[in-house]
Structures are given as C-alpha cells and as structure tokens.
Image: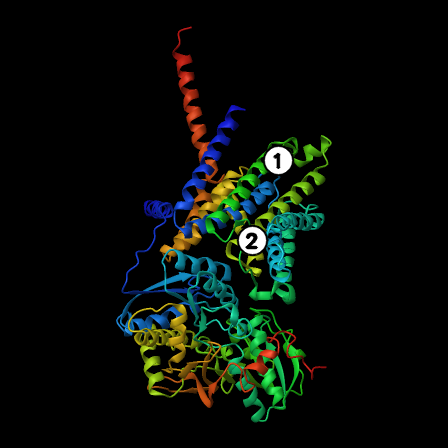
C-alpha cells in the first residue's frame, strides 16, 4: 500500500513539473507536448489491452480515427463543437470509439494471440479504407481542415490554454485507467493475461472481461482522437493509417507494457525524437531505430523495466548484506 | 557509438528543456522549406530542395541582396507532420515565409496554417486545384509558383482532339490528383468533340495492372494515364507486353524526368503534357539543365525547376521591395507584378495567385541533347500552348461555377 502511494506521488510530481515548465519553454515545445499527451492517451489505451489484458491490438488507430473524423466533420459541416458543445463532442467521441470497439470486438475477441493481431489489423484497415474512399464525407486523401479551435469562455486557440485542457484530459485518463487496473475487474484482466484457462475454470467469463476491456480502450482511443483533431486542425487518412496503430504499440513496448506510465514515457521519447530531433539533425531515424533495437535487446520489459531492475538490484544487495550479517552472527 | 547516442539524446533533451529560439537577424531572410526528406517520397523531396539550393548557391546564398537562412524541415510525406513542421518554422525559427509541400493533401493542410499564423506560404510543387480556385478567399497569405493539376491537361485534351483522337480511355490513380488531372483532360477533350468512353481508377501504388488491362475497350484510339511513381514505370511496360498498341496520352507526371531515366524503349513515342520539360530548347533552360546535372548528376524534372523558379521569383521580388521583406500581403502584390523569364518559359501570376505559364505537349524520343554524348530519353516538345491559365479558355467565372474535378465530375456521358 505504501509503495503504490509513493509511485502515485512520483507520477503526480512529474506531471506537476510538466504543467509548470512546459508553458515557459517556447510555443513549439508547448505544441509538441500537447500533441504527445493527446497521443499518450491512445498509447495508454493500447497498454490497457497489451499490458493488462494480454491482447496486442494492431487496430487502435481506428477508434482514434473515428474520434478525430467525428470532430472534424461536425466542426466543418455543421459548425458543431466550436463552443460549449465541445464537451458534447468529447462525449460523442468517447461514445463512437466505444461503439465501434463494441462492434469490432464481436469479431476480434473470439481470437487470441497472432490471430487477434491480424483481425484488429484488418478491421483497422477497413476504417482507413473508408476514410480514404468516402470522399463526400472525409475529403478522401486531402483530409479535412478545421477552422480554429473551440471557444467556450476559455479560448482554446491560445496554445497554452489548449495545452492545459489536454493536460487535464491526459491526467484524468491516466487516473481513471489506473483505478481501473487496480480494481477487481482489472485484477481479473491480469489473471486472464497470465492464464486464461485457469480463470475460466475459476468461473470467470473471460470473453466478457476482454470484450469490456476492448470497449473501454476504444472509448479512450476516441477521446484521444477528438483532442488530436484539434492539435493541428487537420485530419486525414494518415491519422487512421496502420502506422499510427503500430506507433502506439511500439511506444508502449518501448516504455514498458503493463505500467501506463511506460506508455507515456514511450510516447514522449518517440515524439521527442521524431518531431523534435528531426528538426535538428537529418539522421534522427537512426537514433529512433537504435533506441528501439537497444530496448528490445537489453530491456525487453521496456524502459520501465530498467527501474524495476535497479530496484531489484538494490533489494538483493540489501538481502545479501543481511544474510552476511546473519552468517557472521555468532549463534 | 553508445556514447555518441547518449550525447545526442542528452543534447536533444537539453534543447527540449530550454526551448531554443532562433535569434532574429535584421538583414536576414529566413525561409522555411517543407519537403519529404525521409519516407517513400524522399527522392522527390531531395529534388525539390536541390532545385531551390541550386539557385541559392548560384547567387552566393543571397536573394535580392538579403542573406538567406534556408531551413529545411522533413514532413515525411504526411500532411499532419507537415503542419507540425510549418508551425515549428513559424513559432521557433520565426521564418518570413514557408515554401514547399509535395502532395496535394499537404498543400491543403498547409494553407490554413498560413492564414492562422499570418505567414506567407508559397506552394512550389503541390498542385491541388481548389487552393487557387474556389477556396482561395480563405487563404489570403497563400500563393502558388507551380501549377494546378488540371492546368496542363486542359491543353492536352485540346491537343488530342485536334490531332485526330476520337475515343479515349482514362486510367488514373485513385486520389484527388488523379481526379483533377483526368477531369481537366476530359473536360477540354469533350468540349472540343472527343469522347471519353471508359474511366478506370486503380488504387495509388498499384504495381500489377493485369486486372485492368483486359477490360480496356477495343475501339479506343487513345489512353489517358495519370501514373505516380512506380506506377508510371509499370503501366507502359505491362500495357505493351499485353500486345496493346493504342497510343498513350500521359499526364505530365507519368513521363516527367523523375521517372524517364528508368523507363525502357517501350515508351518512345508516348505523348504527355506538363508546364515543364527538360528538353525545352532555350538557352535559359539549357543553362539550367547543365548546371543542375553537373551538380547533382541527373536531369532536372519539374520538381526541381519549380523550386529553382520560386527562388528566382523571390529574388526579383525582394530586389523590387528594396532589399527587405515587406510583409506577406505586400510581398504577394510585388510577386504578382513580376513577369519572370524562367527555365520553363515566361511565368506570371493570375488574379487568383496561380501562375499563367506555357504548357508543353511532349513526345518521348531517344536522342542526344544539349551536347551530351549518349542517346537518352528526352521529352521533346512537339507543341507549345503559350500563357495557359488555370481556367483554360473558359474564363474565371464560368470555370469556377462548376464543381472541382472529382471522381464523378465531369460525368462520363459516353461510358456504357
């Protein structure tokens, strides 16, 4: 109990530091951090499936995409969601992500392992295909431009204001997901991840558990999409394309799956390298590739695995010392 | 290696933390350039940058007397990444203008940034029709130095009709650029009396045309194609291998100098249209081709020429403004007042901030050119349509009354 309290404290402190420092660090950094945090919600939703339920989804960009397209279509065709009704769009975005996941889940959850991966990939590509070909609604390859961000008393066109809004969504999402994985429901998900058969024998409806986790992840994906659409004011099939799903998955693996914080760290690193380092040097891709390879080779548990490894080392050292003490103690 | 990596990471973290901002120098013209430096379009991106750089290096890195700080940013061929980079250029580097963007979709994504940030955007390649047509009023800080997708293909439609083509099949890549090129061709061709009897839309990056070629109607006397990248190499090869000898009328990009060196003899005699050909036989173009080839080892295509010309245009405008950057609105006015003599021929801006330029109907020939000693494929100019506007001969108002060219517009009246 004590230990998890310290963890929460550390994460909260880190978030507080970000919230204080970033607004003073130049508007491009504010923009990048905002984008990274919106994307981190998606990465955490992937972690919910990969790290806590043991399902590697390759189609998470689909829910991200429908959330983003919903926002863009409502804003440009109906001028909806640019005032206080932005909050309605947020709710609708979460709902559409969840509903799509509920539909796709019917097909995907039946399978496991690689088959699950392939089915989610195929379903994700269906959404991409729709975005690419449904010209009258999605603008096809050209995508949709949003004209300006919502203004409901708070003017979100101000980068710093928008940063704080996304920050709030990010922090709340993280807290909610943390509560979820700590709940009895979350614990049973972990049980399914470890040994599904045993959970079935214990009388759990594992299909339903996985299905619900899948829907919740879809909802968070939709939320991330709504925010993402407003970060750059541009939505195109590129938002829904396979690489977006793969990126999210890689970020989780890089940071360390099953930790939520790891997903965020992974997102921060990838965004830092891809969007910031790429403005400094042309060989940023080598660095990104190198980071991936080194992580897989030396840190199969991701960067968060590094932390627990260090902790273990300290603990085992402590143990050895106490053992030595015991051994030298005259009996 | 690891040490270096650590240093880089540390460096980038530090930079991230400090949020480095560029120092503004009063005498300096800061130009941001957005092109795909990595990803599948990296080679095109390099050609774009090379074109601009060539002009800069020929002029001691000065435009109109101002020292130029030229900052290239990588959009990875993704519109969304392009927007992020454009905003980086504006917010962090405080550029006076940003240029570039390859894909039509990138152009559509970048134009709103210019409006939101009140910064000039010059589209030097991206050809999305509507930016300088029906959507122009939304983008007061936007101008184009290149072309609209349909511009050369109106002329090609007219040419085809005048040269005895009666029934033509259209096969074009299934995205906005394909629709706009094919639409321009069909409109002008049918208004002159020709008939488009079949329209086929293979997906972008199709490599196997086996399923499409057998469906071609036999009574066609021409095939209009819009093929991009690898498609351009595969289509003529597979069409001729299937024994079909129908003449090809290509959009410019199906045969431009970017793909031409990699093509076989089967393309000799194929006709295409564009606002540039490396084989334009003028001293100005010859000098450009020779300088470019010497420096970069290849014949320049329109990607390079358009950017070279853009740099030339900015050079003239800054000169005219008295050696300083006068702000976006004034700058566009000055740009519009300049009549440029570019490698591609005379260029000037129309009232919708799109170039009026020559369109060249070109035929692929194997020959020696400009004193090079080897036989090579060149796009020989067989007819020049001078001073073509994006509205062709229809006039602005009449043209803008119709919708933008699309998958279903113009409708295929003669398809069965």
Q: Is residue B398 above or below residue A290?
A: below
Q: Are marks 2 and 1 in contact (CB under 8 Å)?
A: no
- How many labels, in total? 2
Is residue B221 visible in this depiction of the protein? no
Quadrant in which the C terminus of chain A appears: top left
Name which quarter of the figure residue B219 lies in. bottom right
The image position of residue A117, as x and y in percent, is: 62, 49
Which sits in the foreground, A154 or B13?
A: A154
* Chain letter for mark 1: A
Tag 1 secondary structure: helix
A158 or A246: nearer the viewer: A158
Mark closer to the observer (2, 1): 2
Crowd band around label 1 with a 10 angstrom C-alpha radius: few (<14), some (14–19), many (20+): some
Q: Is residue A9 above or below residue A34?
A: above
- Mark 2 or mark 1: which comes first in sequence? 2
The answer as to whether the residues below labels 2 and 1 share one chain is: yes
**For this view, does B316 lie left or right of residue A155?**
left
Residue furthest to the front in view is A153
Please name the residue that numbered disc 1 is placed on: A180
In the rendered view, tell whether residue A171 sits above or below residue B260.
above
Q: Output the chain of dot 2.
A: A
Which residue has dot 2 on it? Answer: A150
Residue B205 x %, y %: 55, 68
Please identify the quarter of the rendering in which residue B358 is found.
Answer: bottom left
Q: How far across and down, in percent of the image, does residue B184 sit? A: 57, 81
Residue B83, label in figure: none
């Amino acid at each position: 109990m004590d230990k998890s309290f310290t963890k929460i404290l550390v994460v909260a402190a880190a978030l507080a530091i970000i919230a204080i420092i970033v607004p003073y660090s130049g508007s491009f950094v504010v923009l990048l951090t905002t984008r990274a945090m919106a994307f981190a919600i998606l990465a955490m939703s992937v972690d919910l499936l990969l790290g806590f339920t043991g399902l590697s989804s390759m189609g998470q960009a689909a829910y991200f995409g429908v959330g983003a397209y919903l926002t863009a279509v409502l804003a440009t065709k109906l001028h909806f969601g640019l005032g206080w009704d932005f909050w309605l769009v947020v709710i609708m975005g979460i709902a559409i992500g969840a509903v799509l996941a509920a539909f796709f889940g019917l097909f995907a959850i039946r399978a496991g392992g690689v088959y699950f991966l392939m089915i989610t990939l195929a379903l994700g590509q269906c959404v991409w295909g729709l975005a690419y070909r449904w010209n009258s609604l999605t603008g096809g390859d050209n995508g949709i431009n949003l004209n300006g961000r919502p203004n409901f008393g708070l003017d979100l066109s101000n980068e710093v204001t928008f940063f704080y809004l996304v920050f709030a969504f990010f922090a709340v999402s993280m807290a909610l997901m943390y509560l979820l994985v700590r709940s009895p429901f979350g614990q049973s998900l972990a049980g399914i991840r470890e040994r599904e058969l045993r959970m079935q024998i214990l009388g759990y409806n594992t299909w339903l558990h996985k299905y619900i986790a899948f829907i919740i992840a879809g909802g968070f994906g939709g939320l991330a999409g709504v925010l993402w659409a407003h970060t750059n004011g541009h939505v195109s099939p590129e938002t829904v394309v396979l690489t977006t799903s793969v990126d999210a998955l890689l970020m989780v693996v890089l940071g360390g799956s099953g930790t939520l914080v790891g997903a965020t760290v992974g997102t921060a690193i990838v965004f830092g390298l891809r969007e910031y380092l790429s403005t400094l040097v042309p060989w940023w891709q080598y660095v990104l590739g190198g980071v991936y390879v080194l992580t897989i080779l030396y840190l199969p548990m991701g960067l968060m695995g590094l932390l627990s490894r260090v902790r273990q080392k300290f603990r085992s050292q402590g143990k050895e010392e106490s053992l030595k003490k015991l051994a030298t103690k005259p009996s | 290696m690891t040490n270096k990596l650590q240093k880089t990471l540390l460096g980038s973290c530090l930079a991230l933390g400090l949020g480095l901002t560029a120092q503004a120098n009063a005498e300096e013209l800061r130009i941001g350039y957005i092109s795909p430096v990595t990803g599948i379009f990296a080679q095109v991106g390099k050609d774009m940058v090379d074109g601009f750089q060539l002009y800069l290096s020929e002029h001691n890195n000065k435009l109109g007397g101002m020292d130029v700080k030229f900052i290239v940013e990588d959009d990875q061929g993704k519109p969304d990444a392009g927007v992020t980079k454009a905003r980086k250029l504006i917010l962090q580097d405080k550029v006076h203008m940003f240029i570039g963007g390859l894909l039509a979709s990138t152009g559509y994504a970048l134009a709103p940034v210019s409006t939101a940030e009140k910064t000039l955007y010059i589209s030097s390649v991206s050809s999305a029709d509507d930016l300088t047509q029906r959507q122009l009023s939304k983008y007061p800080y936007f101008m184009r130095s290149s072309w609209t997708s349909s511009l050369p293909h109106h002329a090609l439609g007219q040419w085809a009709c005048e040269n005895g083509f009666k029934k033509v099949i259209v096969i074009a890549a299934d995205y906005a650029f394909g629709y706009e090129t094919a639409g321009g061709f069909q409109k002008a061709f049918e208004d002159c009396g020709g008939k488009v009897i079949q329209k086929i839309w293979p997906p972008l990056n199709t490599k196997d045309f086996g399923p499409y070629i057998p469906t071609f109607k036999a009574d066609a006397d021409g095939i209009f194609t819009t093929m991009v990248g690898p498609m351009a190499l595969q289509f003529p090869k597979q069409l001729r291998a299937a024994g079909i000898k129908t003449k090809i009328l290509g959009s410019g990009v199906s045969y431009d100098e970017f793909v031409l060196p990699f093509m076989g003899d089967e393309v000799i005699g194929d006709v295409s249209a564009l606002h540039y050909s490396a084989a334009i036989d003028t001293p100005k173009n010859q000098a450009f081709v020779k300088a470019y080839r010497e420096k970069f080892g290849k014949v320049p295509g329109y990607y390079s020429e358009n950017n070279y010309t853009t740099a030339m245009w900015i050079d003239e405008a800054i000169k005219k403004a008295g050696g300083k950057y006068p702000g976006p609105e004034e700058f566009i006015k000055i740009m519009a007042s300049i009549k440029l003599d570019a490698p591609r021929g005379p260029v000037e801006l129309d009232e919708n901030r799109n170039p009026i330029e020559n369109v060249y109907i070109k035929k692929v020939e194997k020959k020696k050119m400009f004193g090079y000693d080897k036989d090579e494929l060149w796009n020989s100019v067989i007819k020049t349509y001078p001073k073509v506007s994006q509205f062709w001969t229809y006039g602005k108002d009449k043209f803008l009354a119709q919708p933008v060219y699309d998958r279903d517009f113009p409708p295929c009246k003669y398809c069965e």
